[in-house]
Amino acid sequence: MSQQLPRTRIWANLLQEVVRTNLCVSCGTCAAVCPVNSIVMKEDQPNLVSVCVACGMCYNSCPRTNFSETEVEEKIFGHQRGDNEEKHLGVYKSCYAARSKDEKVLSRCQDGGAVTSIAMQLMRENSEACAVAAGIEEGTNWRPEPVVAASTEELLRCAGTKYTPSANILGLGSAVKEYEKKRVTLIGTPCQMRGWRRMNTPPFSAIRLGESVELAVGLFCMESFNYESLMEHLQKEGVDLSKVTRFEISSGRFQVLEGKQAVYKATLRKMADFVRPCCHYCTDFTAEFADISVGSIGSPEGWNTVIVRTERGEKALDRAVRAGVLVIKPLEAGEKTGLRTIVKLAKEKREKAEKMKTSEKKA
């Protein structure tokens, strides 16, 4: 009697298990890897707009379906995370505080401008290189969208933190398929880094997309907000979105700024109703599967924390430092700085997500 092969999981399974259960992170991986372009992103959700050829690429590239941290760690790093800080931060080589030396970058960036400076240096060294990042299209009331930045000026316009989702893996697909780029710096959140790593995992591999990434820069992320509900709330509070220059989270408060003036402030507890449901199940604070992870937590004001995870991440950071566009120094331990501060938040996020998963299983 012949052995029955396991059934391929396809779009219908992804729709049922991830999209309709509010687990979708809006990374755009499923749309990027679809070989017949039958999946498109509409209002931060994937939608099937044409025939599904039942290839299984979308389901098996999704960061929310059967993602094995141990298997991916073995493949990327050659070993699993240790029982020290790595238990909560993921595998890493070194950590620094970093700050851009480019005044244009510092005038546009959220904190130290490390992400922009590192990506810019790679683009300066190779005219064929590009970066994929979240940008804001003028006149869209602050809805982020993936941007394929082919020049340093375009990348500079993407500087700054966005607190609602942008399908940056879809941007990676655009960079490779439409712009025919083969050297891409992918900048994104922890879930997007996982989507990119997943698309490189056989047997369902999107090799052309995956191997085009020259450097993957992950951003620290505790949670993101639902775009529609957040913007509706801000407008009810009298915020004129056309005048907003930036959003930021500082000292446990969410702020909306017009220039240097804060026109709206709220504690993160008050903002909890706007957090996307998928974020409650995410265990990854520091983008554990990127080449380099960057955030503001753990470093002095005006600086970034940079966690180097891979050899190519190490080389990219060194290039920026040697070119004189970035300065780095060891992380200093203090009340609000140092590795212990990052570990504390990373541990908190992982434990809350694991508790949520356990409670749902019991229910």
Image (cartoon, rainbow, N blue to C red):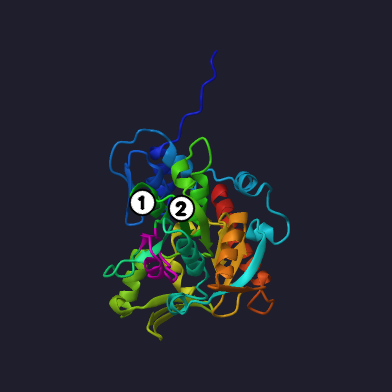
Q: Residue furthest right?
A: 83
Disc 1 residue type (three-letter): Ser
Of labels 1 and 2, earlier in sequence is 1
**Residue of label 1:** 174
Q: Are marks 1 and 2 in contact (CB under 8 Å)?
A: no
Disc 2 residue type (three-letter): Arg
Q: Residue furthest left?
A: 139
Residue 68 position, x and y percent, is: 59, 45
Residue 266 placement, left or right of 332: left
- Could you say which is closer to the camera, residue 11 or residue 158? 158
Residue 59 position, x and y percent, is: 45, 41
Q: Residues within 10 Å of mark 2 (few under 14, many from 20)?
A: many
Q: Quadrant of the N terminus?
A: top right
Q: Residue at position x 53%, y 37% from top?
A: 202
**Residue of label 2:** 183
Disc number placed over residue 64 in the picture, else none: none
The reply to whether the magenta stretch includes residue 163 is: yes
